[in-house]
Amino acid sequence: MKKYIAEVIGTFWLVFASLGAAHFAAGVEGVGLGWLGVSLAFGLTIVTMAYAIGHVSGCHLNPAVSFGLLLAGRFDKKEFAPYVVSQTIGAVLGAGALFLIASGHEGGFNAGAIANGFGEHSPQGYNLAAVFIGEVIFTAIFLIVIIGSTSERAPAGMAPLAIGFTLTLIHMSLIPVSNCSVNPARSIGTAVFQGGWALSQLWVFIVAPLLGAALGAVIHKVIGDKN
Protein backbone atom coordinates (compact mmCIF):
# COMPACT_ATOMS: atom_id res chain seq x y z
CA MET A 1 0.00 0.00 0.00
CA LYS A 2 2.91 2.36 0.59
CA LYS A 3 3.59 2.49 -3.16
CA TYR A 4 0.00 3.32 -3.99
CA ILE A 5 -0.26 5.98 -1.29
CA ALA A 6 2.98 7.49 -2.58
CA GLU A 7 1.52 7.66 -6.10
CA VAL A 8 -1.62 9.36 -4.77
CA ILE A 9 0.47 11.94 -2.91
CA GLY A 10 2.86 12.49 -5.79
CA THR A 11 0.15 12.93 -8.41
CA PHE A 12 -1.77 15.20 -6.05
CA TRP A 13 1.32 17.40 -5.79
CA LEU A 14 1.87 17.38 -9.54
CA VAL A 15 -1.68 18.59 -10.24
CA PHE A 16 -2.09 20.84 -7.21
CA ALA A 17 1.22 22.71 -7.47
CA SER A 18 1.66 22.83 -11.24
CA LEU A 19 -1.91 23.66 -12.18
CA GLY A 20 -2.11 25.90 -9.14
CA ALA A 21 0.68 27.96 -10.69
CA ALA A 22 -1.25 28.01 -13.96
CA HIS A 23 -4.57 28.92 -12.36
CA PHE A 24 -3.51 31.42 -9.72
CA ALA A 25 -0.28 32.97 -10.94
CA ALA A 26 0.18 32.57 -14.69
CA GLY A 27 -1.75 35.65 -15.73
CA VAL A 28 -1.25 37.97 -12.77
CA GLU A 29 -0.60 41.42 -14.23
CA GLY A 30 2.98 42.57 -13.78
CA VAL A 31 4.18 39.50 -11.88
CA GLY A 32 2.51 36.66 -13.77
CA LEU A 33 4.45 33.47 -14.32
CA GLY A 34 3.31 33.05 -17.91
CA TRP A 35 3.78 29.79 -19.83
CA LEU A 36 7.48 29.62 -18.97
CA GLY A 37 6.79 29.78 -15.26
CA VAL A 38 4.06 27.17 -15.49
CA SER A 39 6.39 24.91 -17.47
CA LEU A 40 8.99 25.21 -14.74
CA ALA A 41 6.36 24.41 -12.12
CA PHE A 42 5.59 21.11 -13.81
CA GLY A 43 9.26 20.21 -14.00
CA LEU A 44 9.88 21.14 -10.38
CA THR A 45 7.01 19.04 -9.09
CA ILE A 46 8.52 16.00 -10.79
CA VAL A 47 12.02 16.71 -9.45
CA THR A 48 10.83 17.24 -5.88
CA MET A 49 8.63 14.16 -5.81
CA ALA A 50 11.19 11.98 -7.56
CA TYR A 51 13.61 12.60 -4.71
CA ALA A 52 10.84 12.30 -2.10
CA ILE A 53 9.04 9.13 -3.23
CA GLY A 54 11.12 7.72 -6.06
CA HIS A 55 12.58 5.10 -3.72
CA VAL A 56 9.05 4.11 -2.62
CA SER A 57 7.01 3.86 -5.82
CA GLY A 58 9.32 4.91 -8.63
CA CYS A 59 7.42 8.21 -8.85
CA HIS A 60 5.44 7.48 -12.02
CA LEU A 61 2.59 9.98 -11.34
CA ASN A 62 1.27 9.27 -14.81
CA PRO A 63 -0.59 6.28 -16.32
CA ALA A 64 1.30 6.78 -19.59
CA VAL A 65 4.61 6.47 -17.76
CA SER A 66 3.45 3.30 -16.00
CA PHE A 67 2.27 1.91 -19.35
CA GLY A 68 5.54 2.70 -21.10
CA LEU A 69 7.60 1.18 -18.30
CA LEU A 70 5.39 -1.91 -18.42
CA LEU A 71 6.04 -2.36 -22.15
CA ALA A 72 9.74 -1.76 -21.60
CA GLY A 73 9.89 -4.55 -19.03
CA ARG A 74 10.57 -2.16 -16.16
CA PHE A 75 7.26 -2.57 -14.34
CA ASP A 76 5.23 -5.51 -13.02
CA LYS A 77 1.93 -5.88 -14.89
CA LYS A 78 0.19 -6.76 -11.60
CA GLU A 79 0.94 -3.25 -10.37
CA PHE A 80 -0.35 -1.40 -13.43
CA ALA A 81 -4.05 -1.13 -12.55
CA PRO A 82 -3.47 -0.14 -8.88
CA TYR A 83 -0.97 2.51 -10.01
CA VAL A 84 -3.40 3.98 -12.54
CA VAL A 85 -6.17 4.09 -9.96
CA SER A 86 -3.85 5.74 -7.42
CA GLN A 87 -2.65 8.32 -9.93
CA THR A 88 -6.19 9.17 -11.00
CA ILE A 89 -7.32 9.57 -7.40
CA GLY A 90 -4.36 11.85 -6.69
CA ALA A 91 -5.12 13.98 -9.77
CA VAL A 92 -8.80 14.39 -8.89
CA LEU A 93 -7.90 15.27 -5.30
CA GLY A 94 -5.36 17.82 -6.54
CA ALA A 95 -7.90 19.47 -8.84
CA GLY A 96 -10.45 19.36 -6.03
CA ALA A 97 -8.08 21.16 -3.68
CA LEU A 98 -7.60 23.86 -6.31
CA PHE A 99 -11.36 24.13 -6.60
CA LEU A 100 -11.70 24.67 -2.85
CA ILE A 101 -9.06 27.41 -2.81
CA ALA A 102 -10.42 29.12 -5.93
CA SER A 103 -13.90 29.13 -4.41
CA GLY A 104 -12.59 31.64 -1.89
CA HIS A 105 -12.17 34.24 -4.63
CA GLU A 106 -14.89 36.09 -6.51
CA GLY A 107 -13.53 34.76 -9.80
CA GLY A 108 -14.05 31.18 -8.67
CA PHE A 109 -12.50 28.09 -10.24
CA ASN A 110 -11.69 28.40 -13.94
CA ALA A 111 -11.05 24.76 -14.85
CA GLY A 112 -11.32 25.64 -18.53
CA ALA A 113 -8.08 27.60 -18.29
CA ILE A 114 -6.14 24.52 -17.20
CA ALA A 115 -8.09 21.69 -18.85
CA ASN A 116 -6.79 20.08 -22.03
CA GLY A 117 -8.55 20.62 -25.33
CA PHE A 118 -8.38 21.05 -29.08
CA GLY A 119 -10.08 23.36 -31.56
CA GLU A 120 -11.71 26.29 -29.79
CA HIS A 121 -10.52 24.86 -26.47
CA SER A 122 -6.86 24.82 -27.50
CA PRO A 123 -5.02 27.89 -26.13
CA GLN A 124 -3.98 28.84 -29.67
CA GLY A 125 -6.77 27.12 -31.60
CA TYR A 126 -4.91 23.99 -32.77
CA ASN A 127 -7.06 21.30 -34.38
CA LEU A 128 -7.54 17.68 -33.31
CA ALA A 129 -4.83 16.29 -35.59
CA ALA A 130 -2.20 18.76 -34.37
CA VAL A 131 -3.03 18.15 -30.72
CA PHE A 132 -3.05 14.35 -31.13
CA ILE A 133 0.28 14.29 -32.96
CA GLY A 134 1.87 16.64 -30.44
CA GLU A 135 0.71 14.59 -27.47
CA VAL A 136 1.99 11.36 -29.04
CA ILE A 137 5.43 12.68 -29.98
CA PHE A 138 6.14 14.53 -26.75
CA THR A 139 4.99 11.60 -24.62
CA ALA A 140 7.23 9.28 -26.64
CA ILE A 141 10.25 11.51 -26.01
CA PHE A 142 9.31 11.73 -22.33
CA LEU A 143 9.36 7.93 -22.04
CA ILE A 144 12.66 7.65 -23.88
CA VAL A 145 14.23 10.03 -21.36
CA ILE A 146 12.63 8.30 -18.36
CA ILE A 147 13.68 4.81 -19.43
CA GLY A 148 17.16 5.91 -20.44
CA SER A 149 17.92 8.09 -17.42
CA THR A 150 16.81 5.39 -14.96
CA SER A 151 18.97 2.73 -16.58
CA GLU A 152 21.63 1.13 -14.39
CA ARG A 153 24.19 2.46 -16.88
CA ALA A 154 23.01 6.08 -16.56
CA PRO A 155 24.69 8.54 -14.14
CA ALA A 156 23.46 7.76 -10.64
CA GLY A 157 21.12 10.23 -8.97
CA MET A 158 20.60 12.40 -12.05
CA ALA A 159 17.37 10.88 -13.36
CA PRO A 160 15.02 13.25 -11.47
CA LEU A 161 16.73 16.27 -12.98
CA ALA A 162 16.72 14.86 -16.51
CA ILE A 163 13.06 13.90 -16.24
CA GLY A 164 12.05 17.20 -14.66
CA PHE A 165 13.88 19.28 -17.26
CA THR A 166 12.31 17.20 -20.03
CA LEU A 167 8.82 17.79 -18.69
CA THR A 168 9.60 21.51 -18.49
CA LEU A 169 10.66 21.57 -22.14
CA ILE A 170 7.59 19.59 -23.15
CA HIS A 171 5.30 22.11 -21.49
CA MET A 172 7.14 25.05 -23.01
CA SER A 173 6.29 23.65 -26.44
CA LEU A 174 2.92 22.02 -25.88
CA ILE A 175 1.01 24.42 -23.60
CA PRO A 176 0.02 26.65 -26.56
CA VAL A 177 -1.18 23.61 -28.48
CA SER A 178 -3.23 21.60 -25.99
CA ASN A 179 -2.49 23.07 -22.54
CA CYS A 180 -0.12 20.07 -22.44
CA SER A 181 -1.24 16.78 -21.02
CA VAL A 182 1.17 13.87 -21.75
CA ASN A 183 -0.56 12.49 -18.64
CA PRO A 184 -4.08 10.97 -18.66
CA ALA A 185 -4.50 11.36 -14.89
CA ARG A 186 -3.75 15.09 -15.04
CA SER A 187 -6.34 15.48 -17.82
CA ILE A 188 -8.97 13.45 -15.97
CA GLY A 189 -8.51 15.54 -12.82
CA THR A 190 -9.30 18.83 -14.53
CA ALA A 191 -11.97 17.41 -16.87
CA VAL A 192 -13.97 16.16 -13.89
CA PHE A 193 -14.36 19.72 -12.62
CA GLN A 194 -14.76 21.39 -16.01
CA GLY A 195 -17.26 18.84 -17.34
CA GLY A 196 -18.94 19.37 -20.73
CA TRP A 197 -16.45 19.86 -23.52
CA ALA A 198 -13.47 18.74 -21.41
CA LEU A 199 -15.06 15.35 -20.78
CA SER A 200 -16.07 14.98 -24.43
CA GLN A 201 -12.49 15.67 -25.57
CA LEU A 202 -10.85 13.68 -22.78
CA TRP A 203 -10.38 10.57 -24.94
CA VAL A 204 -7.63 12.37 -26.89
CA PHE A 205 -5.62 12.96 -23.74
CA ILE A 206 -5.91 9.33 -22.72
CA VAL A 207 -5.31 7.65 -26.07
CA ALA A 208 -2.54 9.91 -27.41
CA PRO A 209 -0.27 9.77 -24.31
CA LEU A 210 -0.69 5.98 -24.05
CA LEU A 211 0.15 5.60 -27.73
CA GLY A 212 3.14 7.89 -27.29
CA ALA A 213 4.32 5.91 -24.27
CA ALA A 214 4.17 2.70 -26.29
CA LEU A 215 6.11 4.35 -29.11
CA GLY A 216 8.75 5.60 -26.67
CA ALA A 217 9.15 2.13 -25.15
CA VAL A 218 9.61 0.58 -28.62
CA ILE A 219 12.15 3.21 -29.67
CA HIS A 220 14.17 2.72 -26.50
CA LYS A 221 14.28 -1.02 -27.06
CA VAL A 222 15.87 -0.30 -30.43
CA ILE A 223 18.43 2.26 -29.28
CA GLY A 224 18.85 1.49 -25.58
CA ASP A 225 19.90 -1.32 -23.29
CA LYS A 226 18.01 -3.94 -21.30
CA ASN A 227 18.58 -2.28 -17.93
Image: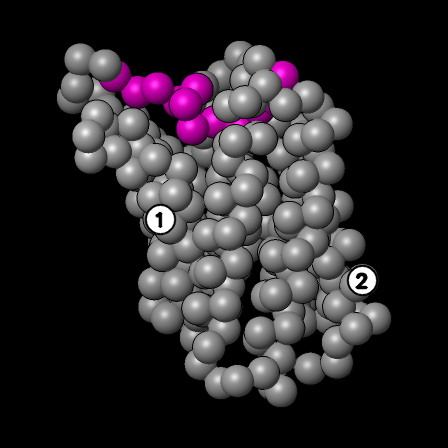
Residue at mark 2: 218
Q: Residue furthest right?
A: 222
**Kind of residue at badge 2:** Val
**Residue drawn at 61 percent across, 61 percent down:** 79
Disc nearest the viewer among 1 and 2: 1
- 169 is within the stretch colored magenta: no
Which region is colored magenta? Answer: 108-119
Image x and y of residue 215, in percent:
77, 54
State the quadrant of the C terminus.
bottom right
Q: Tell me the tag on residue 195.
A: none
SS at mark 1?
helix
The earlier-in-sequence mark between 1 and 2 is 1
**Residue drawn at 34 percent across, 35 percent down:** 34
Estimate how packed mark 1 is, as few (under 14), some (14 to 19) or many (20 or more) residues with alpha carbons within 10 Å.
Answer: many
**Residue drawn at 75 percent across, 27 percent down:** 129
Residue at mark 1: 41
Do the CB atoms of the residues marked 1 and 2 lie less than 8 Å apart? Answer: no
Q: Nearer the viewer, residue 97 or 85?
A: 97
